[in-house]
Amino acid sequence: MAGFKETPRQKMIAMMYLVLTAMLALNVSKEILEAFKVVNESLVSTNVNFTNKVNSLYDEFEKQYDLNQKKVEPFWDKAKAVREISANFTNYLDSVKINTIIHTEGIKIGGKYGISYDSVKKITLRDLKQIDNFSKPTHYLVGIETHKGEGYELQEKIEKYRKDLLSFIPEDRRSYFNIGLNTKGKFINTDGSFTKDWVYYNFYHTILAADVTIINKILAEAKNAEFDIVNYLAQDISAKDFKFSKIEAKILANSAYVFQGDEYKAEIFVAAVDEKNNPTVEFRMGTSEWHDEFSSTSTKLLGENGMVHLKLPTRNLTPKEYTFSGRIIIKDPTGEQQSYPFASSFTVAEPSANVSASKMNVFYRGVDNPIRISASGIPDHRLDYAITTGQIKKTDEGYVVSGLGRNTLSTNQLTITVYALDENKVRTKKLGVQVFRLKQLPDPDVLVRGMNEDGDILKGEILTNPYLMCQLPEFVNFEYPFEVNAFSMTAYKVNGESYDLFSTGSKLTTEMESYIRDARRGSDIVFKNIKVKGPTGDRKVPALVLTLR
């Protein structure tokens, strides 16, 4: 928030802006909130995996210390210092996340009617009632007036944590480490303007669901940075000086989930080897386990500084899960080549963003309604769905909802539920539910070929094309061949008395054509009682008035 004193006019404008933003916030769609829940759950799962991965690295480090304390002790002491620094920082991140939830949800801690702090730690986004609230998280993280929120303390902690981790790396090597956790630089706001305020950019008017997800993302970066530093310390131990209890091939991917068009990037290496000993990697796509006979048809990559950098373009890959396996070949301390197998997988997904208007979720009866079914982080073949009325079909163009005919006239809405499938095609989790309103297609516009927008038409045009035609309005993004099957035309006698001429199809009768042929220029021709055949039966539509010219 701004620290300067505002004029009454500025305060009034700010208040109006807050009210408008609050009104907009009320329209945060269920799909977007559900997407935050799914992404946050994925981050929580990733953080658990990162923690296990880092802990395994510490366990391996300690084994090497037990085998050769004199050689490993300097590196092990640094690794333990990294572990302590990281534990303090991640504990602080957890406290910021929990306190943001407590502040927003109005949870009372302790006392006769309060709950324990540890109980709050177990709360997930799906348990919260205020996940679309942005004002309270903003007050806590950004602050009000001259009071700065907790976000600025968080920024200082991130910067110190990053600096502390990099202090374990020689200064001339730090440029090779991209450990993230950057809070410096310019950030682009939603209005296109630039700001140097990292806190304002991330947490100003950000809903609670997004705040929790952002903090979990920072936690993932912190764990990844911790792994990189400890892994570097482990590699500094020369394998030539002592025996490891176990040597394994490692593959470290930037992400196992990539958007179509991006590159899948990973680093493949063997722990505790000389960086001057450049390895070779052989790998083969579409395999889940390496066999030496794959070598002749495999792709080969040369390493540098003890690592092989794997980059796989995905621009021409179909969105789905891909597997690959291979081996890394490296010289041991005696000069002999040793190989270590590896296997991994990644998922390619189309870049997407779900945006929907809360009052526009409508299906029309009697036509195929196109829909898109997707979930962030889950490939198409791992999704299943259910619908309460009608059926969902997959076509070459995508999904459509059909079967909404006359049997749905008494139904005003339907529900679609999306599920995640495991490898055995068994539903494992409900990902989201969407309710759609069910309506009739709008009435078609009735017209005669040759008429202009004002309803004017030449006598010769209508007599050349004596048919009433149907056309759906431009705002309806569907096609359906409505047909006129009956109508009447008002005619006038010499004394001014009116009478009706009737047609049982879309064509003008002989009497109608004769009347029009004798009518004078400027006369109005009125077609009424128009009945059209639609997808759910006949319906009556508004009259059509033409002026002869």
Image: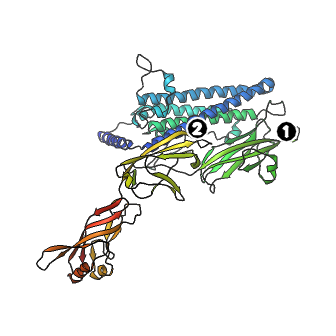
Disc on res. 181:
2
Using the image as rendered, state which of residue 114 and residue 388 is in the foreground: 388
Tell me if residue 290 can be seen: yes
Asked which quadrant contains residue 345, the reply is top right
Comes first in the chain, label 1 or label 2: 2
> Circle 1: is it few (<14), some (14-19), or many (20+) Cα within 10 Å?
some
* In the image, farthest residue toward the left: 495
> Dividing the image into 4 quarters, which one contains the N terminus?
top left
Looking at the image, which residue is at 42% across and 25% down?
107
Query: In the rendered image of this protein, does residue 423 appear above or below residue 112?
Result: below
Q: Is mark 1 on a helix, strand or loop?
A: loop
Asked which quadrant contains residue 4, the reply is top left
Q: How far apart are marks 1 and 2 (CA)?
A: 36 Å
> Circle 2: is it few (<14), some (14-19), or many (20+) Cα within 10 Å?
some
- Residue type at the position of mark 2: Leu
x, y percent for residue 430:
51, 40
Asked whether, in this view, residue 243 is left or right of residue 449, the answer is: right
Q: How many marks?
A: 2
Using the image as rendered, state which of residue 343 and residue 131 is in the foreground: 343
Q: Is mark 2 on a helix, strand or loop?
A: loop
x, y percent for residue 362:
39, 52
Residue, disc 1 = 332
Looking at the image, which residue is at 68% across and 51% down?
312
Looking at the image, which residue is at 47% across and 34% down?
126
> Dividing the image into 4 quarters, which one contains the C terminus?
bottom left
- Residue type at the position of mark 1: Asp
Asked which quadrant contains residue 288, the reply is top right
Asked whether, in this view, residue 72 is left or right of residue 44, the answer is: right
x, y percent for residue 513:
26, 80
